Image (cartoon, helix red, strand yellow):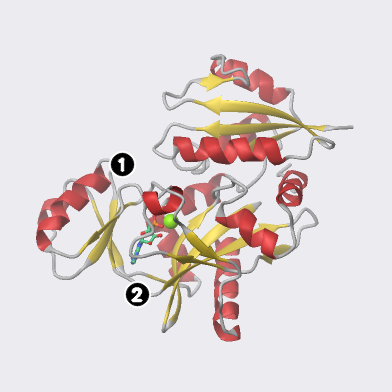
Amino acid sequence: MRTRVAVIGGGQNCEHDVSLASAASVVAGLDPATYDVVPLTIGRDGTWRDRGMRPIGLSGAAEVLRGCDVVFPVVHGPRGEDGALAALCELAGLPYVGSGIRPGALAMDKWATKLVAQAVGIATAPGGLVTAATAAHLRWSRPVVVKPVAAGSSLGVSLVTAPEALRPALDAALALDDRVLVEDVVAGREIDVAVLRRADGRVVAAPALEIVAQGLFDYDAKYGGHADFRVPAVLDDVDAKALEDAALSAYDALGCAGVVRVDFFLTEAGPVLNEVNTTPGMTQHSQVPRMFAAAGLSYADLLDELVRGAHR
Ligand SMILES: Nc1ncnc2c1ncn2[C@@H]1O[C@H](COP(=O)(O)OP(=O)(O)O)[C@@H](O)[C@H]1O
Ligand SMILES: [Mg+2]
């Protein structure tokens, strides 16, 4: 019997378009011989729409979801990746792909992620939290990276190298979140590691990927078609092992499921964790599918592993 999979894309946040692209790829990539795919889209305003883009509301969406065997949420960022869609599936009693509520919420919060990482001995960039109330007291003393605690796609992220740039950077980040991280700048190569719990329960890491970018890996570099990925990343055995170990222990410490992308800076002192994405970009050309392709797992097979490994 064919499995009916609801693929949810879009979402009410600044990564809406990125999610639409991921969801469209997942819809196209699920093998039609095995799966009946039912696309659902959440508008920027929160309106749920069916495959014909007709507004159906949350109750209509619940009806559609109830008719499916598995839900495949592909909504990046707040009200999606942060555990919101996992919560919807939990409450509705629906099997779903990917991480549960707690890992989603923890990993969406870059401050909470730091605390969990530190607790299991994974280095992160030293940094502090700022809110609108405390931002005025912050004095610039050295170059920093300013970013929203919970956003994505580099939106609201700034490298601040001069005192007069601090305030505008804080304002840009505060426009996306009421908590902002001010971090030391980490000098190192940007290396991503994808971790997957396979349908048989084994947790595996794919070969690492290096992002070859000039300066910040910003929105334009990510989606302007200029991103230069090197897969597999050229690494010596010690660095490769340190990255993989750190990625696997972050996955376990947060309690992730499905596939996640763990992003690092590789410094002279070893890996420094930047962030964990529990709903990473999933177009065929995104990092995660490319990393698994390098390991011999095709895009269709990766999606198949995810659906078969869904929470039940
Ligand atoms: N502490 C840091 N030091 C150096 N570069 C950083 C730092 N934090 C972020 N960056 C750069 O900014 C990019 C986006 O930041 P990131 O924390 O990954 O936010 P997002 O969730 O939007 O992807 C990173 O890919 C990296 O290039
Ligand atoms: Mg990032």
Where residue 307 appears, x then y in whole percent?
Answer: 74, 43
Q: Secondary structure at mark 1?
A: loop
Which quadrant is the C terminus positioned in?
A: top right
Quarter of the rendering containing residue 112: bottom left
Query: Does residue 74 appear anywhere in the picture?
Result: no
| Residue under the point 60% across and 56% down | 288
Q: Nearer the viewer, residue 21 or 146?
A: 21
| Residue under the point 16% across and 47% down | 133
Which label was assigned to residue 176?
1
Q: Is ligand 1 less than 8 Å from the beta carbon at label 1?
A: no
From the viewer's perspective, tell me whether residue 187 is left or right of residue 253: left
The residue carrying pointer 2 sits among few (fewer than 14), some (14 to 19) or many (20 or more) residues within 10 Å by Cα, namely few
Q: Secondary structure at mark 2?
A: loop
Q: Is ligand 1 less than 8 Å from the beta carbon at label 2?
A: yes
Q: Which residue is mark 2?
A: 187
Q: Does the residue at mark 2 contact the one at mark 1 (Cβ under 8 Å)?
A: no
Label 2 amino acid?
Ala
Position of residue 217 relative to residue 153, above or below, is below
